[in-house]
Amino acid sequence: MQVLLQTPSEKQKIFLKDSHRFVAFGGARGGGKSWAVRTKAVLLALKYRGIRICILRRTYSELRVNHIDTLKSQLLGVALYSEGKREFYFPGGSVIYCRYCQNENDLGKLQGTEYDVVFIDEATQFTESMFRMISACVRGTNSFPKRVYLTCNPGGVGHGWVKRLFIDKKYNKGETPSDYSFIRSLVTDNEALMRFDSGYIKQLESLPSKLRKAWLEGDWNIFEGQFFEEFRDVPEHYADRRFSHVIEPFEVPASWPIYRSYDFGYGKPFDCSWWTVDEDGRAYLILQLYGCARYPNTGVKWSPDRQFSEIHKIETEHRWLKGKNIIGVADPSIWDSSRGEAIIDTADRHFVHFSPGDNKRIPGWMQCHYRLQFDSEGRAMVYFFKTCTDAVRTLPLLEYSKHNPEDLDTDGEDHFADSFRYFAMSRPIFLSEAPRARTDFYGDDPLDLRGGGRYKKYSYI
Ligand SMILES: Nc1ncnc2c1ncn2[C@@H]1O[C@H](COP(=O)(O)OP(=O)(O)OP(=O)(O)O)[C@@H](O)[C@H]1O
Ligand SMILES: [Mg+2]
């Protein structure tokens, strides 16, 4: 019987030898974390006959692609795999349990089970209470090691507690500092990836500067301040306005398509934005109807009926829109009919039609960031006519969320931003010239280039 294991990097070696109760590894993207998890799990299963090991991810698809598929081929002829139970059985009696923790129900299933060693891959995707509950499963009346291994990147719902325990090392009552160990590993420490896929580092380098600092340099102190930090509104008296997202309106060519994005609001602002796209895929916000925010003290509310009748009126009268086949995308919650007529039915009555927008927030924000980025000549993939004053006013005001640092603070005036996000997700772009030649991917991962084809800079999928 033989298990083939690749040679670890220097950082992975330190991780494999670490025997603290809580060992965290990584702190940036691509540092060889998931590899280290699989390798350590197999080594433990072979060394301690009868040990119970659990590998955890937040979602089943991440678990399967990052771990199950690879372990199945690596352990072929060594351990038996049960598809139904998602467990690997080793001849000596050791078991690797592959588990995910997408919701409370999944967490409930873990409660009461006992493991000797648990691996939480991408621990920053887990809340602190999940971590506590999972850690409580690590127990048993045997002499096997009792450990929790965690891998992590800055960002995600668990950013705060992972940073406190492993980066800032600030402990609460009942926590023993000597139990915690952190091994930093950046993409540059992953010698194998550097050798075979140098394109991946380019992709990290092309991220907006804060995310780049987080994922490339492993900086945990980045989620403060303006969310759309790349947004530029260069004043009109500057001669060179190339690096400005806000532009003078121009006459929209009749052949360019028109899109409409909509974020519902009643009592709070709604946003209806009209976009056009040129031959290069560059988007322009050309018109905007932004509900009642301009009259914050009047208490004026536009009912859904009023909103859609105004939208319809604009679409039948404005020279850029009338007679056009307008493609609409909207906040999916407007399909909800649990409290009477769904908003979408009201819209349909006014001949304003939509399809549901993709509401995944983090990939959606990444698409907005990608579009906002300037190339070396000062060209972005999205521009805003300066007449769309509520877009131009609100976008730079938005701040990072304190709870989920990859998201924005939803207490801000984010109605246009949401509408922009639905539009951006309906026409996603990639930034990379050389896509990442990797076989694993991540459910909601904005760096995930599933499909693997060769893309020109800023091409469509
Ligand atoms: N020691 C090694 N030998 C060979 N290949 C390796 C080694 N370590 C990592 N790799 C490969 O490098 C790539 C990235 O590694 P891995 O997926 O473990 O990184 P990660 O830190 O989990 O990345 P992410 O932050 O994207 O989750 C994978 O293709 C993996 O198989
Ligand atoms: Mg990983």
Image (cartoon, rainbow, N blue to C red):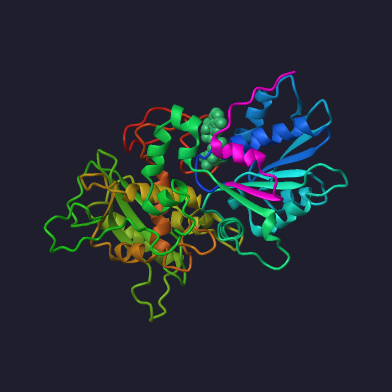
Left or right of residue 286, residue 190 in this image: right
- Residue 308 seen in this snapshot: no
The residue lying at 67 percent from left, 67 percent from top is 172
Is 375 a magenta residue? no
Does 270 appear above or below 437? below
Left or right of residue 110, residue 203 in this image: left
- Residue 337 seen in this snapshot: yes
Question: Is residue 451 or residue 133 the one in the foreground?
Answer: 133
Left or right of residue 354, residue 83 in this image: right
Does 60 appear above or below 261? above
Q: Residue 68 in the image: state x and y as whole percent.
A: 66, 32
For ligand 2, the image quadrant comes to: top right
Is 20 a magenta residue? yes
Q: Residue 64 in the image: state x and y as whole percent.
A: 64, 34
The residue lying at 53 percent from left, 54 percent from top is 335
Q: Residue furthest bottom?
A: 297
Q: Residue 101 in the image: state x and y as whole percent.
A: 68, 47
The residue lying at 79 percent from left, 44 percent from top is 115
The residue lying at 18 percent from left, 57 percent from top is 248
- The picture quadrant where one finds residue 388 is bottom left
Image label count: 0
Which image quarter holds the N terminus?
A: top right
Q: What range of the chain is rendered magenta?
A: 1-25
Does 459 appear above or below 329? above
Question: Is residue 31 or residue 345 the one in the foreground?
Answer: 31
Which image quarter holds the C terminus?
A: top left
